[in-house]
Image (spheres, rainbow, N blue to C red):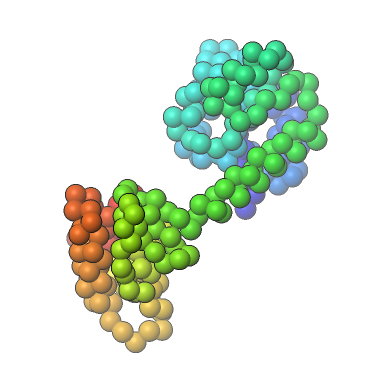
Amino acid sequence: MKSKIMLVDDEKDIVTFMRDSLEAEGYQILVAYNSEEALRQLPQQPDLIVLDIMMPGMDGYQLCEEIRQHVSCPILFVSARNTEHDRIKGLVVGGDDYIEKPFSLKELKTRIFAHLRREHRNSHKAYHRIHAKNLIIDTLAYEVFYQNEKLAFTYREFEIIKFLVMHPNQVFSKEQIYEQVWGIDSLGDSTTITEHIKKIRAKIQKYDPLSTYISTVWGVGYKWEG
């Protein structure tokens, strides 16, 4: 799936110009003509934001600071303001790049591609090391650490942890967990999940007794507390 880009600019002609070109590249485009529209669309989790500075009401600098309270995706400022002070301020308030108007579409697309590629590399590197409260879970090395202490789990116990931690706050029945970990064609019994989770909890609580990691949703199943 192509990345989702939000364009925030009060100049509709420029937005149309950028949107048409980026959609032709296969990107999903969100459009906002002011800060209020941009903030309303943040729950759609854009992968990158192209943000103008000079807008009525809340300007791009203020909006960038507000956005940074909610998402961490790359933010590229585009502006006719081209002083060193403007560029530095854009980076200080949370921007990742600064492009002066007028700009070429080729440069814009190249910078967007470069930032998204870097985000992809960073997420890929971090993907196998998941920080969950006081635990670090390495899904490739099959290791769980509390601070510098390595916790010992069996293969099945780790597979349960891995499955749940990669779907935080999502409730799964014992049958769903069993099928995911043991396989749909396994001849075992899903009631073993209860015993495995009991052991997982006991091992974690030995190191971190005050935190809840796997909670029971009565009558439904279990979930990882995100």
Q: Is residue 152 above or below residue 123?
A: below
Q: Residue at x 23, y 53 (%)?
A: 208
Give the x, y percent position of residue 101. Answer: 75, 20
Q: Name the side, left or right, on which 196 lies relative to 109.
A: left
Task: Return the residue nearer the eye: 106 or 8.
Answer: 106
- Please indicate whether residue 122 sits to the left or right of residue 155 in the image: right
Residue in view at x 50 percent, y 55 percent:
127
- Please tell me whether residue 179 is drawn above or below residue 10 in the rendered image: below
Query: In the rendered view, does 132 fall on the left or right side of 39?
Result: left
| Residue 210 placement (x, y as % from top left) | 19, 49
- Residue 167 visible at all: no
Q: Residue furthest front?
A: 148
Q: Quadrant of residue 143?
A: bottom left
**Residue 50 versus residue 172 in the image, above or below:** above
Residue drawn at point x = 69 percent, y = 38 percent: 112
Q: Position of residue 174 (x, y in %)?
A: 29, 70
Q: Nearer the viewer, residue 151 or 226?
A: 151
Taking 73 as reference, is 209 above or below it?
below
Measuring from the top left, give residue 31's x and y in whole percent: 61, 31
Residue for point 74% across, 33% down:
108
Could you say which is closer to the camera, residue 94 or residue 106?
A: 94
Relative depth, front residue between 53 and 221? 53
